[in-house]
Image (spheres, rainbow, N blue to C red):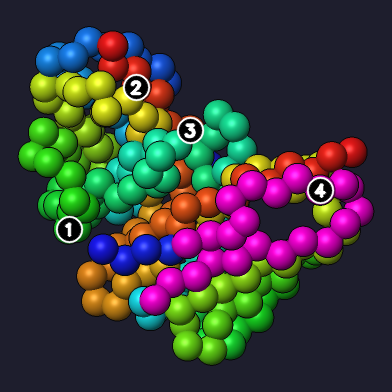
Amino acid sequence: KAGVTQTPRYLIKTRGQQVTLSCSPISGHRSVSWYQQTPGQGLQFLFEYFSETQRNKGNFPGRFSGRQFSNSRSEMNVSTLELGDSALYLCASSLVTSVSEQFFGPGTRLTVL
Amino acid sequence: TQLLEQSPQFLSIQEGENLTVYCNSSSVFSSLQWYRQEPGEGPVLLVTVVTGGEVKKLKRLTFQFGDARKDSSLHITAAQPGDTGLYLCAGANFGNEKLTFGTGTRLTIIP
């Protein structure tokens, strides 16, 4: 069974630009969660999608948004990038809910210059 | 904001030694998970503990959930280089189905 895949793996953008990250969950998993990981703040929850609906949201500004498609694939968008958005963005999928067993992808390393 | 503090933040020990990593909070969690993350990869779930006082063993790793469900510990016996990684605890909140991750412990096992 294929694991969670994230594309791209690495991305370099400049301040003010926007970026879209993609996540393909494990086949059959309906819940997709997004996290931001930085050395200073650790791993922080961004949002969770289930059956194309945002089910939970963390404490991030509205510049961070996401969506989920009917095949459970998910995208995350960050608009008006800031230097502080540089981070590893992780996607995790689970069968039903993010607090059940989650499987993480390898992440997308975003660098904002 | 709920906080999960892990200690120590960094730990470097010789192969064969024992160690314990702690995860503490002032909040009560419905369950607690432990993950290990290696460079260039996402975290991998090691265990989930649900009941206060619960102890789970995974080979040389022993996980304990505090009686009050506010803290947890991970004990590794006879550490091996393959145990090297970032260990993260994550607490699940009652009702809102969100995970709060701990600050992490970076463990290095020296051969």
Q: Nearer the viewer, residue A61 or A8?
A: A61
Would you identify the image quadrant in which residue B72 lies?
A: bottom right
Q: Tell me the kind of residue under disc 1.
A: Arg
- How crowded is the residue under tag 1: few (<14 C-alpha within 10 Å), some, or many (20+)? some
The x and y percentages for residue A82 are 19, 23
Check residue B13 in the rendering and tell me which mark sits there, or answer none.
Answer: 4
Q: Tell me the kind of residue under disc 2.
A: Leu
Foreground mark, 4 or 3, reads: 4
Pick whichever of labels 3 and 1 is earlier in the sequence.
Answer: 1
Check residue A55 in the rendering and tell me which mark sits there, or answer none.
Answer: 1
Q: Nearer the viewer, residue A70 or B110?
A: B110
CA distance separating discs 4 and 1: 42 Å
Pick whichever of labels 1 and 2 is earlier in the sequence.
Answer: 1
The residue to which callout 3 is attached is A106
The residue to which callout 2 is attached is A110
CA distance separating discs 2 and 3: 13 Å
- Residue range highlighted in magenta: B5-26
Q: Residue furthest left?
A: A62
